[in-house]
Image (cartoon, rainbow, N blue to C red):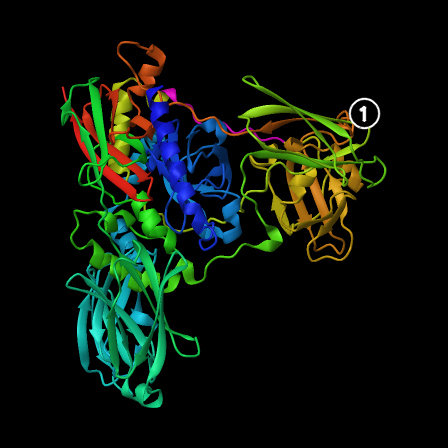
Amino acid sequence: MIQNKKTLCFLLFLLSIVSFNAQDKKTIPDIEKIYLHTDRSTYFVGEDLWYKAYNVRASNNLLFDNSNILYVELISDDSKMIARNKTNLEMGLGHGDFQLVDSVGVKPGIYQLRAYTNWNRNFGEEFVFKKDIEIIDVFEEHSQSQSKHTISENQTKNIRKKTQSNFKVDFFPEGGSLLENVASFVGFKAVDSNGKPIEIKGELLDSNNELVTAFESVHDGMGKFQMVPMEGKTYYAKIKTLSGEELKTELPNVFQQGYLISFRTIKGKNIISITTNEITLSQNSNAFLTVVCKAKGIPYLETTQTLTETSLSFELPKDKTPNGISQITLFDNTNKPQSERLIYITKEHDLDVQLLTDSNTYEPNEKTIVYVSTVSKDGTPKSASFSLSVTDTNGVEEDNFESNICSYFLMESDIRGKIHHPGYYFDNNNPKRLDHLDNLLLTQGWRDFVWKTTPKVNEKNLFKPEKGITISGRVKEVFSDKPLINNNLTLALMNKKNSIFLSAITDSMGRFEFKNLMFFDKTNMYLNSVNEKGKFRGEMVLDSIERAPIPVRLKKELFLLPETKQITENVLNKFTAFGVKPENVLNEVVVKSKNKYWQPVYYKNPFSTYTPDIVTKTLVSIWDVLEIVPGIWVKDRFDRDLRVVGEKDVPSILVNGFGVYNYDLDYILPNEIVKIEVVRELGVPIISIFINRNWNDKPKKVPVYSVKQEIEGFSTARIFYSPDPEKPNPMSDKNAAVRNTIYWNPFVHPDGTGETSIDYYNTNVETKLKVALEGITAHGIPVVKTTYYSIKK
């Protein structure tokens, strides 16, 4: 109850912030940005994954009450969706969990956790949250350990030699180009054949083979050097890795004319410089140049400068520059972009967040109290919402600098591509982090910036903000498309916990709509239509309750996750100590048999194949399924008109090898579909559907004026179980004794004094624990805090 009051107070305060910023709605794009704080990044089969969702306005990182449905998906490395939650967002906050068990198809491997709202699909996949996690079977790893360690030393050397045989180095001139007789900094980035950073040393030489400068990487294969490109010369680099491999590569071409923009921090001042050469200046004397500074796609400074000399500098006002990444672009007098630079501005916030435990060492099963304080530097309380995880380090104590809410909202979400150890650049204990972050922006940011242009809504396929679940459709005459007006509809939604009863009337188009419904988990839907006289009349055609998920396009690439060998060994020892033994886990048994329902189908290579996943079962009719099958175009849903993309002829429809009419497909339920294949190479296009029953055994057809179906509502988030010695629960306590997440709380909200405390009981395992706090203040400041303590007898 106390925790709920704290949450309510925070949400009420947040409402005032949202209202205050509503006046800026005309100038700020309503783009959402999502981050999930998970309890860990490495899990074991059978465990739970817990997450807290933060949905903010992309322009200012303020919690955003725009969408109330967040789709959170767990995707395997073979691009299969294993699980999907509809998470309820309230004022931009939500939470949920996944059970990583065999029954939902979870196997050891690399998975992607993906989260998005339907509204943000209008702006492209850059605004979809993605995080890689690893799921391990601790007993499988143990059983294979012998074979893994029997590789000979010679084989190891050969493998190492093979994997390190290729590397590449890319060069990125500041501002985008090299210009004759103009001093420029050049950033570089070195990666191996797997895209992993490697350290290098090199020499820069000109076309006369004369040494210009030496250089070497300073962090994660990145660094920079300064040079003055001379007239008529080209340049190349000779590079060596620490293992002795060599590479020779050309630098980008040098331009004779142009303008460059650069950025430096000098004595605490942010200085922007515009430079050119004499030939450009002589042909464009007194040139008018415009500098535009943007953050999150929104301009915050525009200034016009007259270039009378080859160099001009001015200070970027700190009071106008927002925190985070900015894009500085230089335009000539024809409004043509000449040069661009990405910079990162860090501002000192009037915020002091403390995360403390009441001791550094605890006895097994002893209570821990965690104190959280969020105040200004003069002690004024600050409102914030946090999530807290307490996890077993399992012997791995070094920080792997994985992604966190600071690195994601302030950097990762503004740059395309994966960033190695993103948390490194936001470690306040690292004095070189900002210099190394600038190298990152000179290289990866130089070509992969998200905000090149402000994203626009795709008007042709508009996704609307979802405030709840909508059930809609139309009622028409049975043997025609004529709408039935003023028909009365009754909707009943019933599950084990709640029942909802609603009514509606069809409009002049025969349409009806039940908007923004709130119901949870699997729910039985009963929908009926009667005319004005109270008689069952008409055919009901239901719209899709859910839009099809974003297609999964996972690339086969190296995932740079923390080393798990030591973690696996320690977890195995912990499981063994508490009586969880490998022989108690049975290997999966796969039973294969021929499908007795299918007739032979004679074609070799289908154009596309669709295999149903968990989403298919949530769809209302087979027509919802056909709309998401690659290669199929549902030209007219009401006339049952199907086409194959790229084919003029009407396709033949097969069900289990039998030819059927399009209207016969109404008898197929989405959960009966085994697979759908699209065939194009036989002269006549074919849509072949396979179902898990005999086609002649058609189910009893539901009356056209009625719909009865099980649908999926919002996902009910479970409550993390925390053992209490005063109220023992033998079964739950036994499982809790070996789990790797000791405590999880998505509702950490400081009270009116800016403080709060959380308490829980530790496990019986002697180990070191990591306490991680992540969240965001009501004014949009992301926060990350960590601390450690030990359990010892």
User: Which residue corresponds to the image point at 32% horizontal and 57% vertical from the top-left?
Assistant: 325
* Image quarter of the C terminus: top left
Residue 476 in which image quadrant: top right
- For the record, the magenta segment spans 584-593
Q: Amino acid at mark 1?
A: Phe
587 left or right, relative to 669: left
Q: Provide the residue designation for mark 1.
A: 536
Vertical position of residue 277 compared to residue 450: above or below:
below
Q: Is residue 588 visible?
A: no
Q: Secondary structure at mark 1?
A: loop
Task: Give coordinates of residue 180: x percent, y percent.
Answer: 28, 83
Magenta-drawn stretch contains 460 = no
Residue 426 percent location from the top left of the image = 24, 48
Q: Quadrant of residue 458?
A: bottom right
Viewer-side residue, 608 vs 254: 254
Q: Position of residue 376 (x, y in %)?
A: 21, 40
How many numbered markers are drawn? 1
Q: Nearer the viewer, residue 382 or 514?
A: 382
Q: Identify which residue, 197 or 95, lies in the foreground.
A: 95
The x, y position of residue 79, in whole percent, is 49, 44
On-image quarter of the N terminus: top left
Q: Is residue 426 visible?
A: yes
The image shows residue 624, relative to residue 702, as above or below, that is: below
> On screen, 52 above or below 302?
above
Magenta stretch prevailing secondary structure: loop
Report the residue at 42% width, 38% height from top.
92
Residue at the right extreme, as displayed: 479
Q: Mark 1 packing: few (<14 Cα in 10 Å), some, or many (20+)?
A: some
Apparent side of residue 347 relative to residue 88 in the rendered image (left or right): left
